[in-house]
Image: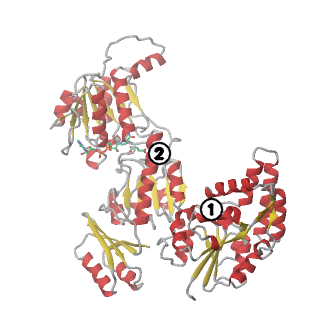
Amino acid sequence: MADKRFFVIDFDSTFTKVEALDILSDILYEGTDKKVEVGKKIKDLTDQAMAGELSFREALEQRLALLDATKKDVEQLSGELKLLVSESVKRNRSFFTNEKDNVLIVSSGFKDFITPVVKDFGIKEENIYANTFTYNDKDEVTGFDASNPLSEHKGKVKLMKELALEGEVLVIGDGYTDYEIREAGLAKTFFAFTENIKREKVLAKADVEANSFEEILHSIKHPMATSFPKSKIKVLLLENVHQDAKLKLEQEGYQVELLGGALDEDELCEKIKGVHILGIRSKTILTRKVVEAADRLMLVGAFCIGTNQIDLKACTDHGVSVFNAPFSNTRSVVEMAIGEIILLMRQIPKRMRQMDRKEWSKSANGSFEVRGKKLGIIGYGNIGSQLSVLAEMLGMDVYYYDVVEKLALGNATKLSSLDELLATCDVVSLHVDGRPSNKKFFTGEHINKMKKGAVLVNLARGPVVELDALQIALETGHLSGAAIDVFPVEPKNNNDTFDAPLSNIDNLILTPHIGGSTLEAQENIADFVPGKMIEYVNTGSSFNSVNFPNVQLPRLENGHRLLHIHRNKSGILAQMNNVFAKHGCNILGQYLKTNEEIGYVITDIDQSYQPELLEDMRAIEDTIKFRILY
Ligand SMILES: NC(=O)c1ccc[n+]([C@@H]2O[C@H](COP(=O)([O-])OP(=O)(O)OC[C@H]3O[C@@H](n4cnc5c(N)ncnc54)[C@H](O)[C@@H]3O)[C@@H](O)[C@H]2O)c1
Ligand SMILES: O=C(O)CC[C@@H](O)C(=O)O
């Protein structure tokens, strides 16, 4: 029995985020003048008791005297508390189920509202130690059972003495009364739980500060711990990515900082220190210098489609996996392209400018329906092919050209040369990716090969089109209009000014790179990319990574997972397996994938192994990164 380990866990501000009596006071006085006044008194009394400045019994009596509650109110309180369980407790629900024999809730709160909340987590009713209310025959709370040791000053100590647990006792709580158990020599370790509230006086007494449940599991090397406490994972999000992303990552337990704009190279070299996960959009240029300045970086999330702003090779060389959102904003771009094509064909930008100049030009000259017109799509990827479908629904004849073989959707016609497309189409819409060879891909020569009076749309990447040549084609009337959303140089944020490279053209739509800027798209991205980040951290799965060999992995159960990223040279797997053999290690599963540059080997092994095994794995030549999940 001596090696049994008990987890003695406080309820208020530890298991839940809040002090239950504060919430009860809110329930009772909601919408009345007393709400603030009583709420403050209750809070002050709680704080004084938790900091050890007021005897617990006195604080309890004074607080209950302020609250005229009934059984129904207490039931409502339970319901609200169920929604207010601490985030890291929620994340570790399976811990409570697995450890149900060893988890004790020891609280100076009341079983009446605690039991329904903690029982949902599998905690046994007989392991819940707390006070109980007394009620009169009208179900009104009249007080508490004063014979319960937990209603007394140093009540937790008294209870723990009575319990006389045989084994290692760990106390987890936010209050001085939790520390008192340790002070009395009845616990081995006191974890000051600071996820919800930090009480300096309590912290000063702590053996360990834990601002999440994961930190506790990590610190005691519990088999259900994750290898690195999530609360120590630092995430830096730039360029105003949607708030939902921040929330999702915070709910996972990470520390998240969200900045409004992009940072330049030097700023980023500074800011990236200590950061494990970086999130950017299209304006942050992630150079090799930045990747090399990063001392903790394990993954980058591009909250957009394009990854041309990222030095992918540098990331790969340093074992940094890059994820993007390959289709979360596709529909938004397509809708904008459709809208712009219609506007240009009707000369709407020109008419609007004329109206601004107080000119009335009610004329059909140069204005056309899109029905029956020929749309040429260059780059028939996710966006190009979806545009193809929607444009056909408007009655356009769709032609496309791509450098790789692509299935024609609907009635679209594949053309085998760009020249043929340019000579055929009334509208040309560019949807190529931002690979380096596409810089200045669409030259003046291509523009000149377009049909006279045609229109050009570029919502792909700025450097793709030669804008000087486009300006001339628009001025001379060779093209009748253009819509440009992306530019060779774009401002870092909304406070910077922008000198448009095209000017004095009437039938021209210029937009500030907003093809993917709809709330729907940004919300989709804020769900998708953090999902990928969390999966990579938790399981090692690199599925959908832009630069890593794609491996889709199951969640790890009852083992340890070793993730080994190395330069792709022959013999590394053999070396790894020699290390496993040397240490007599039982392999539960192994996955290997390589690309031209790196190999990614994931090995699940039995939990019992010698720690030297890890040293030997790290020592394998050409190892880039090595991490363990457990
Ligand atoms: N304006 C915006 O806000 C916005 C939003 C999202 C995406 N984008 C950009 O739109 C572009 C397309 O995105 P996607 O998701 O469809 O990408 P994708 O990778 O699915 O498709 C790109 C297609 O272009 C083809 N291609 C590449 N170079 C080519 C060339 N020189 N000639 C012909 N075909 C070529 C590829 O083979 C591929 O089929 C990307 O540049 C992306 O960054 C812009
Ligand atoms: O939102 C952005 O910054 C970029 C949008 C777009 O260019 C993309 O690549 O998805």
Label 2 packing within 10 angstroms: few (<14), some (14-19), many (20+): some
Determine the quadrant in which ligand 1 lies: top left
The answer to which image quadrant residue 548 occupies is bottom left
Residue located 77% across and 59% down the image:
43
Identify the amino acid type marked 1.
Val
Identify the amino acid type marked 2.
Glu
Q: Residue 418's spot in the image, x, y percent?
A: 19, 36
Left or right: residue 586 versus residue 121 is left
Q: Extreme front residue here?
A: 137
Residue located 82% across and 45% down the image:
33
Mark sitting earlier along the chain (2/1): 1
Residue located 60% across and 71% down the image:
124
Residue located 46% across and 58% down the image:
278
Query: Is the CB–ligand 2 distance for label 1 below 8 Å?
Result: no
Question: Which element type, helix, strand or loop, lies under badge 1?
Answer: helix
Question: Which element type, helix, strand or loop, lies under badge 2?
Answer: helix
Task: Give the residue pinned by disc 1.
Answer: 117
Q: Residue 4's spot in the image, x, y percent?
A: 56, 84
Q: Residue 122's spot in the image, x, y percent?
A: 56, 67
Quick one: quadrant of the N terminus? Answer: bottom right
Quick one: quadrant of the C terminus? Answer: bottom left
